[in-house]
Structures are given as structure tokens and as C-alpha cells.
């Protein structure tokens, strides 16, 4: 049976497929049914045309495969699916481009526990490079969506995410 670390490894390999860009992070995401262990959808940063995030691509691909708009993804995630989202970096709360943040995309799948993404597993917090103090964990948990850090992948997730960024000398 696949474990959290297996899904996180899948997400890391998805993140590696993303073209490095100095203006965002390279992230990979997978939507999984925790009941069946079936991977419902995957995504990575810039996979879909435009300035797209991993979590956004994952949800949009899933919606499209069911001929639904992304706003209606929650309808496909009934409580017994036990839908969980794995993502190498915590979901964004603010987008400099003005696009809809991924936290909103996750929250709109959730209707009081009847449908939607129940837990978010992530490897690393978002660095303060673009947006200061990402608060997605607190915001998701306030709405009843658990956020779980899968330990042991922080360094690798960050290294993949920041590929293509100007390297800053470490101070330590
Ligand atoms: C996550 C992604 C991705 C980011 N975060 N979780 N998944 N690219 O696929 C977060 C970062 C935003 C910047 C730039 N990145 O993406 O904060 O241009 O990429 O709207 O805020 O904003 P835009
Ligand atoms: Zn995002």
C-alpha cells in the first residue's frame, strides 16, 4: 500500500517536470483518494497553459477529465472518496499575478465535510521570496482542513522549487 512518502516522491518528480522560472516556485501536486489509494489527478507548476500553479493544474485536469468546470470539482469528491491533496509546497494564499490563490481553489471543494479535500500533505512552507508569511496552514485548519507536513523532504522540495532562481550566498 502506498504511503505518504510515496505520494510525496511522486509530487517531487512532477515538480521536476516544471520549467524553472525565477518568478515562481516549481511545485508538484497529486489528488488522491485515501480510501482507494487511487491517484485521481496530478499537476505541476506551468503544466497547463498560462501562469498556472501545481495545485491549480491538478484540480483543473481532474475537472476537465469529468467535463466539469474547476469550480465544481467538489461535486466529484464525495465524503467517501476521502480526497486528500499532496503538494511539495504549501498552497499559496496570494498570487502576485492576481490569479485565484490555490487555497481558495481547495476551500471551494469543501462543503462542511460532505465533499471535498479533507487533508493537505506538504513537504515545505513557502519561503518569503514572493509573498511574506504564507498563512495557508492556519486558514485551511480554521475551515476544518487538516494540513500535515511530511517530514524528510524539506530540503529536496526547496531545491527543486528554487531551481532557476538567482542563488543567494548562505549566511551560516
Ligand atoms: C505553490 C505552485 C507555485 C507556488 N506555490 N504552492 N504551487 N508556483 O505551483 C507561490 C508564489 C507565487 C508568487 C507569484 N508559488 O504565481 O508565491 O505569478 O508563485 O501569480 O506569488 O505569483 P504568480
Ligand atoms: Zn497556488
Image (cartoon, rainbow, N blue to C red):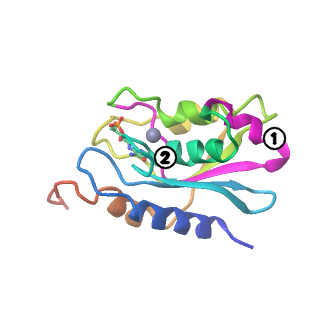
Ligand 1 falls in quadrant: top left
Residue 114 location (% of width, % of height): 82, 34
**Corner quadrant of residue 134:** top left
Above or below: residue 18 compared with residue 6: above
Q: Give the left or right position of residue 24, taking residue 171 as reference.
A: right
Q: Nearer the viewer, residue 139 or 12?
A: 12
Rendered residue at 41%/29% (across/down): 99
Image quarter (top left, top right, bottom left or bottom right) of the N terminus: bottom right
Tell me if the residue at label 2 has its CB under 8 Å from ligand 1: yes
Count neighbours of disc 1 (C-alpha within 10 A) and say few if under 14, some if 14 to 19, many if 20 or more.
some
Dot 2 falls on a residue whose secondary structure is loop
Dot 1 falls on a residue whose secondary structure is loop
Q: Give the left or right position of residue 93, taking residue 2 as reference.
A: left
Count neighbours of disc 2 (C-alpha within 10 A) and say few if under 14, some if 14 to 19, many if 20 or more.
many
Q: Give the left or right position of residue 45, taking residue 162 as reference.
A: right
User: In front of the other: label 2 or label 1?
Assistant: 1
Residue 97 location (% of width, % of height): 33, 30
Q: CA distance from mark 2 to mark 1?
A: 23 Å
Q: Is residue 74 magenta?
A: yes
Q: Nearer the viewer, residue 168 or 117?
A: 117
Q: Nearer the viewer, residue 49 or 76?
A: 49
Q: Residue furthest right?
A: 80
Q: Which residues are magenta?
A: 71-95
**Mark 2 or mark 1: which comes first in sequence?**
1
Residue 59 location (% of width, % of height): 59, 43
On the image, numbered disc 1 is attached to which residue? 78
Rendered residue at 67%/36% (across/down): 68
Rendered residue at 52%/62% (across/down): 11
Residue 172 location (% of width, % of height): 20, 62
Rendered residue at 28%/60% (across/down): 163
Residue 90 tag number? 2
Residue 149 tag number? none
Amino acid at each position: 500500500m502506498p504511503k505518504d512518502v510515496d505520494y510525496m516522491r511522486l509530487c517531487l518528480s512532477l515538480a521536476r517536470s516544471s520549467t524553472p522560472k525565477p518568478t515562481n516556485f516549481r511545485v508538484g501536486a497529486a489528488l488522491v483518494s485515501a480510501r482507494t489509494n487511487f491517484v485521481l489527478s496530478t499537476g505541476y507548476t506551468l503544466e497547463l497553459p498560462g501562469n498556472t500553479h501545481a495545485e491549480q493544474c491538478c484540480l483543473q485536469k481532474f475537472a476537465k477529465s469529468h467535463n466539469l468546470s474547476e469550480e465544481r470539482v467538489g461535486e466529484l469528491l464525495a465524503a467517501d472518496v476521502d480526497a486528500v491533496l499532496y503538494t511539495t509546497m504549501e498552497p499559496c494564499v496570494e498570487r502576485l499575478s492576481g490569479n485565484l490563490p490555490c487555497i481558495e481553489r481547495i476551500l471551494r471543494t469543501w462543503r462542511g465535510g460532505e465533499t471535498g479535500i479533507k487533508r493537505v500533505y506538504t513537504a515545505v512552507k513557502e519561503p518569503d521570496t514572493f509573498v511574506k508569511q504564507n498563512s495557508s496552514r492556519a486558514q485551511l485548519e480554521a475551515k476544518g482542513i487538516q494540513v500535515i507536513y511530511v517530514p524528510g523532504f524539506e530540503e529536496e522540495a526547496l531545491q527543486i522549487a528554487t531551481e532557476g532562481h538567482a542563488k543567494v550566498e548562505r549566511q551560516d
